[in-house]
Structure formats: C-alpha cells, structure tokens
Amino acid sequence: MSVTRRYRQAWEEFWAEVPDEPGAVFWDSEPALAAGLQLPLFSPHLTDPELPLVDLGCGNGTQTRFLAGRFPRVVGADIAAAAIEHARHADPGGRAAYRVLDAADKAEAESLHAELGDVNVYMRGVLHQCEPDDRQSLVDCLAVLAGERGRVFLVELSEAARPILGRLAQDPAGPPAKLAPVFRHGIAPGEVADAAVPEYLRAAGLTVLDDGELPLATTEFAPDGRRIDLPSKWLVAGRAR
C-alpha cells in the first residue's frame, strides 16, 4: 500500500514554498531541543549502534545532520522530493545521504532494507500526519526496515496536543505564521490516540521496549515570548529477543 497522491502532492507543495533559512518550518527546531534530547533515550536500547540509521520523514534534514555525527551511516528519507532538495542543499559536505521514499510502500521499504540491511530508525512526528488508512502500513514498513536487529524510535504528538493546536488555528488573529502553511496545504496534524501507537507497533510484530513523555519543541513563540511546546510521547520498539 502506498500513500495517496493527494498526500504526496500536499507535501511537495509545502516544501516547495519553504525558504532555506533554519527554523522556517513550525517543527524544525534545532537539534539541541529535538534529537539531542531524544538520542539519550534511544541509545541504551540499541542492540547494534553500528547499524545504519534512517531518519524517516527527514524534511530538510536538520535532525539528520545532527544524527550523522553520531552514527557511522545515516540516510534521511522523505516522501517529498522538494524536502530532499532542501536537505541536500543544507548538507553540501554530504554528511548524510538523502532519498525520496514512500515509507508506507512495502516494496520500497523492502528495497531499502535489501540495500542497507537491518537499520535503526528515527521518526519524529510523522505518524500523526499520515492519512488514517496509511498508518498501519507505515508502521509495518518500519518493522521491515528494522529487521531483526534494528530499533525504532518514534516521537508523536499526544492527544493533549490537539486542543493546543486547535486554539492556535482558531486564534482571531489567525494561526502563527509558521503554522499557517501547514493548514493551508491540508497537512494539519491529525489525531492519533495515545493507545493506538503501541498497538500499531505490536501489529507490525514489534515489541515496545520503553516509552515516555517529552515536549515537542516548535520554532514558534507565544505573544509573551514563550516557545510553543506541544505534548508528545516517545517509544522505542524492536523485535523481541
């Protein structure tokens, strides 16, 4: 199963409009507030830190480039070719590799696994942006990529984030400038029940090894100057050994 054409087109159009400067995207926070905080939660569960790491839904590669300094081989993958163009442009030294990937397409996941072997997977805030019918297919493909030895680290908005996003969207002055394009292109975050995420993983044959809560930092700020953080949950999963 592949993602819908509408979904792919929405992301292409979104990334085609994004300027190159850092922090221009609502969720594109600096690694110190994202992967830098999350990696210590993920690393203790790695059975083999020398495996390649795939940053799935890498966007413009901000977190990918950080992770490339901490794993021997890192691949940033995204459904939108326009996002991959941004990532490559921001990484002229080629610290990581980048490719377009429909991560809900089993054939594409199997092809990448055939090339790289088992991998560790980092995925931040992707599942809740998928069409509901694609979510299990996406998680099934995570299991294909991880294989027997890899581990999967997921960060997803929690149910508690939805009312916050709703208030931002309905502000009389309009949504924050960096959030407005997300709504305009029809890729506004959808609701994924907190309990559904581990069930997707279990249905894919993965065991949840650890989980917790950690705010997802955005690049937008409230009128009082406070950074807008969204409640999120993280999970580590892999094959039972």
Image (cartoon, rainbow, N blue to C red):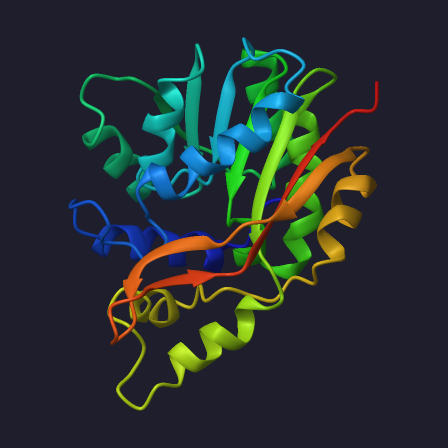
User: Residue 227 at what x, y percent from top left?
Assistant: 32, 62
As rendered, which of 210 and 9 lies closer to the eye?
210
Query: Residue at image x 22%, y 53%?
Result: 24
Q: Is residue 66 left or right of residue 167?
A: left
Nearest the eye: 104 or 214: 214
Q: Residue at x 60, y 35 (%)?
A: 153
Residue name at image x 79 percent, y 49 percent: 199
- Give how far across and how far down residue 27 sits, in percent: 37, 53
- Note whether residue 38 is visible: yes
Which quarter of the rendered picture does the C terminus lie within?
top right
Q: Is residue 210 left or right of residue 157?
A: right
**Residue drawn where x is 33% and y is 48% of the image:** 28
The image quadrant of residue 51 is top right
Toward the viewer: 153 or 224?
Answer: 224
Q: In the rendered view of the protein, which quadrant contains the N terminus?
A: top right
Residue 57: image x %, image y %?
A: 46, 41
Please state the total of marks drawn on the protein image.
0
User: Is 15 situated left or right of 101 in this image?
Assistant: left
Identify which residue, 205 or 81, lies in the foreground. 205
* Residue 81 in view of the camera: no
Question: Residue 145: x, y in percent?
Answer: 63, 25
The answer to whether residue 167 is above or below residue 104 is below
Vertical position of residue 161 compared to residue 116: above or below: below
Q: Quadrant of residue 64?
A: top left
